[in-house]
Amino acid sequence: EAGVTQSPRYAVLQEGQAVSFWCDPISGHDTLYWYQQPRDQGPQLLVYFRDEAVIDNSQLPSDRFSAVRPKGTNSTLKIQSAKQGDTATYLCASSLGTARAPLFGEGTRLSVL
Amino acid sequence: QQQVRQSPQSLTVWEGETAILNCSYEDSTFNYFPWYQQFPGEGPALLISISSVSDKKEDGRFTIFFNKREKKLSLHITDSQPGDSATYFCAASDYGNEKITFGAGTKLTIKP
């Protein structure tokens, strides 16, 4: 069974540029999460979906970040105008509702210069 | 407010010793606690988990001890191996909520 797939693996931007991250969850998993993990810190939830619906986006900086999962499968996280403080690894995870613990992809490491 | 706290921040033990990683939480509604292992450049990998109805969960060299009254958990890694060197995250969620809250992690180094 294929795991959670993320792309790209790395991204380097100047402040003010836009970037999109893509996630393909494990087949059949209805719940999809996006986490931000700053260097030497734990993952911090940004947003999560059940199927195509946003369940919790309270920690997503809505002025610059957006996330969609239009068909309840793949998902895209976009940063409209990146800031140096956005430098972090962005992790996608998925789970089947009853499984409780999400399984993670390898992440996208973002550096904003 | 940090709802899940881990200690120590970093820990070094010799190969063959038992490493003990601590976790505490504040929200009494938390009832499920997965632990993740993360190597540099990789995503966190689910290692072992426990629900609040149990006070102990064992999987090979990894054991979780859970004290519901004190809201504390610990992960014991027996016969530590250099390959166990990684960062370990304690996480928590409550029943009916798919939202998982992570601690800041413990960086474990095993010296050969």
Image (spheres, rainbow, N blue to C red):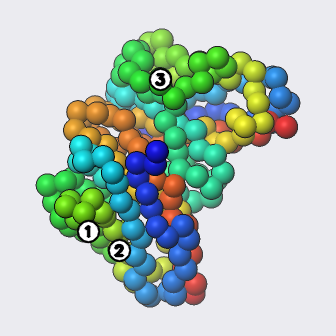
Q: What residue type is labelled 1?
A: Phe
Residue B112, which numbered label? none
What chain is tagged by disc 1? B
Image quarter (top left, top right, bottom left or bottom right) of the C terminus of chain A: top right
- Relative to B22, is A38 on the left or the right? right
Image quarter (top left, top right, bottom left or bottom right) of the N terminus of chain A: top left
What chain is tagged by disc 2? B
Mark 1 and mark 2: Cα distance apart in space: 8 Å
Residue B70 falls in image quadrant: bottom left
Which residue has dot 2 on it?
A: B76
Residue A57, which numbered label? 3
Residue sitting at the far front: B1
| Residue under disc 3 on the same chain as residue under disc 2 | no
Q: Say which label, 1 or 2, has the lower sequence index.
A: 1
| Residue under disc 1 on the same chain as residue under disc 3 | no
What chain is tagged by disc 3? A
- Relative to B65, is B12 on the left or the right? right
Which residue has dot 1 on it?
A: B65
Secondary element under disc 2, as helix, strand or loop, is strand
Q: Residue at x 19, y 61 (%)?
A: B69
Whether the residues at callouts 1 and 2 have beta carbons within 8 Å, the answer is yes
Q: What residue type is labelled 2?
A: His
- How many callouts does the rendering have? 3
Q: Position of residue A15 (x, y in %)?
A: 83, 28
Camera-side mark, 3 or 2 = 3
Secondary element under disc 1, as helix, strand or loop, is strand
The answer to whether residue B45 is seen in the rendering is no
